[in-house]
Structures are given as C-alpha cells and as structure tokens.
Image (cartoon, rainbow, N blue to C red):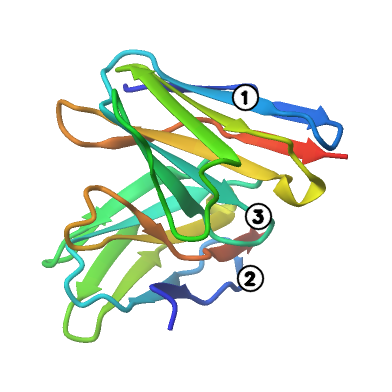
C-alpha cells in the first residue's frame, strides 16, 4: 500500500462548482498533514495545513479523519485559476519534517 | 516571506556529464535541506536529507555516489548528479527548513534533460 494515496483525476468541473478531493495515508502515527498546490512544471506551494478540528481558508476547507486515515480538501465556487494539481502531503511520526507526497489530483476548471 | 533560490532552472546536457544544482536560502538559515525528484505525472520523491556540516541521509534506492550532496553552510546545499544518463532526466526540487520555525520552503526546481 502506498504511504499516501490520491485519485489522480483529472477532475473536470465547471466554473463555480464545488469539488472535493480525498487522500488516504497508511501510517496511523502520522502527525502533520498538508495540502499543496502544484502548477504544471512548477514547484509545489503550500495551500493549507490540515488540523484535526478541520480548518477553512476562504473557499478552501480541509478536514482530517484520523480514525479512517483520510484527509479531504473542499473547494467551493471554483475559479479557472484553481486549475492545478493538488498534492496531499503527510509528515510521518518522527519524520523530522520529512514530507511524503501523494501523486496529486489534477483539477481542471472550465468555463 | 522566506525565499529559496534554486539554480539552474533548466539544464540540457550530454550523457556522461556531471551536473551541479544549487539550493540557497536567501533570508533565513537552513540547517536542513531536502532534495526531491519528480518524474512526469508522478509524486515528489524524497532523495536525501542534507544536514549542514554533516553527511547527507539518503533514502532507500538512491545511490549516494551518484547523487553527491554537500551542505557546506547554513544557506547553501548542492546536489551533483554525476555521470548523468537519460534516465536521470527529471525535475529536481530542493526545500529548506527554516531553523526559526521549522517551516519548509521550496526552490523553483531544476528541469534536467540528459540527451
């Protein structure tokens, strides 16, 4: 089983739609969780951290379910500029900030 | 905000050439830097953890003699791909951990193409 698994997509959605991505992780002792955004041929950029209580940043909401070992990202009112690959990232316990990346989920927002 | 400069951004060279990639933290000290590799449509894979003043820690399956890492100062780590071959063509990205708050910041990446 991969350490971090994501549906690669692509998810093609119309502008204004709400879209959700899920990610599962295998290490139950993992401590920190993040969503990164990566544009084509660019470096990943931190979108948001994911907290146990769930957190929201504008149109983006992240949730963590430790019991089921999955993380979700919800994007409301999708914009064309949201088109990118969204990477689920986990910092395993004792990993010393050694991040483990999922393969990413590709989102294409269309007119 | 914290900035990490990675150079060069693009390299095209012949098979057998050695290529050096630099990763600099411009406005913070980084005792630890990480080197990743990303093949097309694949996830970033950690290659090695670079610690200032000591030997790098390599991930399983990464040849330390092939990918030489030097972290001589608190703001600079280098990755040298020795005797590069076409299968080494990839996107190499570094990240630097800010010693003040442990946050990680990525460089812009280096696209390496070996002919």
Q: Residues within 10 Å of mark 2 (few under 14, many from 20)?
A: few
Residue A40 is situated, as x and y percent measured from the top left of the image, at 65, 47
* Position above or below: A83 against A69: above
Q: Nearer the viewer, mark 3 or mark 2?
A: 3
Q: Earlier in the sequence, mark 1 or mark 3?
A: 1
Report how far apart the C-alphas of labels 1 and 3 lie in the structure: 19 Å
Q: What label sits on residue B20 in the rendered view? A: 1
Quarter placement of the N terminus of chain B:
top left
Q: Which residue in the structure is indicated by mark 2?
A: A10
Which residue is nearer to you in this view: B9 or B18?
B18
Q: Could you tell me which residue is drawn at 54 percent across and 60 percent down?
A: B43
- Kindly identify which numbered label has been placed on residue B39: 3
Is there a contact, CB below 8 Å, between mark 1 and mark 3? no
The Cα–Cα distance between marks 3 and 2, rounded to whole angstroms, is 18 Å
Q: CA distance from mark 2 to mark 1?
A: 35 Å
- In the foreground, A28 or B78: B78
Chain under label 3? B
Q: Dot 2 lies on which element?
A: loop
């Amino acid at each position: 089983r991969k350490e971090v698994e994501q549906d690669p997509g692509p998810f093609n959605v119309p502008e204004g739609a709400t879209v959700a991505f899920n990610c599962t992780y295998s290490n139950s002792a993992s401590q920190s969780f993040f969503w990164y955004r990566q544009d084509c041929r660019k470096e990943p950029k931190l979108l948001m951290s994911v907290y146990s209580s769930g957190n929201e940043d504008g149109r983006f909401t992240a949730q963590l379910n430790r019991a089921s070992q999955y993380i979700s990202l919800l994007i409301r009112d999708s914009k064309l500029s949201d088109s990118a690959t969204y990477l689920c990232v986990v910092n395993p316990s004792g990993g010393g900030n050694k991040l483990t990346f999922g393969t990413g989920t590709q989102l294409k927002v269309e007119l | 905000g914290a900035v990490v400069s990675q150079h060069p951004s693009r390299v095209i060279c012949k098979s057998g050439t050695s290529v050096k990639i630099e990763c600099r933290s411009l406005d913070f000290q980084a005792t630890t830097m990480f080197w990743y590799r990303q093949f097309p449509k694949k996830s970033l894979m950690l290659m090695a953890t670079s610690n200032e003043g000591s030997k790098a820690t390599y991930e399983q399956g990464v040849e330390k003699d092939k990918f030489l890492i030097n972290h001589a100062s608190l703001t600079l780590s280098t990755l040298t791909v020795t005797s590069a071959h076409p299968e080494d063509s990839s996107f190499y990205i570094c990240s630097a951990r800010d010693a003040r708050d442990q946050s990680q910041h990525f460089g812009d990446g280096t696209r390496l193409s070996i002919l």
